[in-house]
Amino acid sequence: MILDDWKRKYSNEETREVALPWFWEHYNPSEYSLWRIDYKYNDELTQIFMTSNLIGGFFARLEASRKYIFGSASVYGKANDSVIIGAFVIRGQEALAAFDVAPYYESYEFTKLDPTKAADKEFIGDQWSWDKPATVKGKTYEWADGKVFK
């Protein structure tokens, strides 16, 4: 899989109908890995626009890894009751090598996903499509805003 081809497909096609099927057809787990990110300090988040700006700042600091990473992170919830969750595909098998260029990467928990598991595959689709709510610790949050790193 050529990551730039995926980024173009994601940017120019319908996500669920065209882009995701293309991704799964071309994804090579020996070359790339999938990761879930969870912000560790959700209890400190207040306004949705400020939380979205937090994601934008994190993404800006990932610039050195742009050719190795694609993903999105979203704010789910409402003011004073929100969470940040995201999903990334990374060239290689270790998240730290791609994310440690950003000074605040330690504010996120990285969990490797298994594309052979239906739940992990569904999580990736939901994160990249922005069309379903997310459940964290038994509580469901509606999608509020998101950013794509490509």
Image (tube, helix red, strand yellow):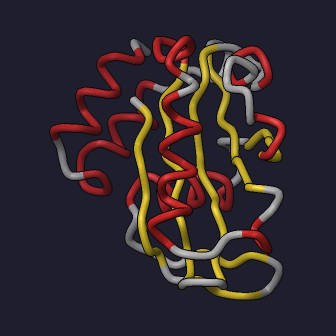
Identity of the residue drawn at 68% across and 15% down:
30
Q: Quadrant of the N terminus?
A: top left
Q: Position of residue 29 (x, y in %)?
A: 64, 23
Front-most of residues 70 and 103:
103
Left or right: residue 81 versus residue 21 is right
Task: Please say if 107 is above or below 70.
Answer: below
Up-down relation of residue 59 to residue 64 (above or below)? below
Task: Answer with the quarter of the image where residue 139 lies.
Answer: bottom right
Q: Residue at x 63, y 75 (%)?
A: 46
Q: Position of residue 102 (x, y in %)?
A: 67, 25
* Residue at screen point 52% across, 35% down: 59
Q: Does residue 29 sit above or below 19 in this rendering?
A: above
Count of labels shown? 0
Question: Could you tell me residue 88's position as x and y percent?
Answer: 58, 37
Q: Nearer the viewer, residue 5 or 71?
A: 71
Quarter occupied by residue 17: bottom left
Q: Residue at x 59, y 38 (%)?
A: 58
Pick the quarter of the image with the C terminus.
top left
Q: Residue furthest left?
A: 12
- Eyeballing the image, is 13 above or below 76? above
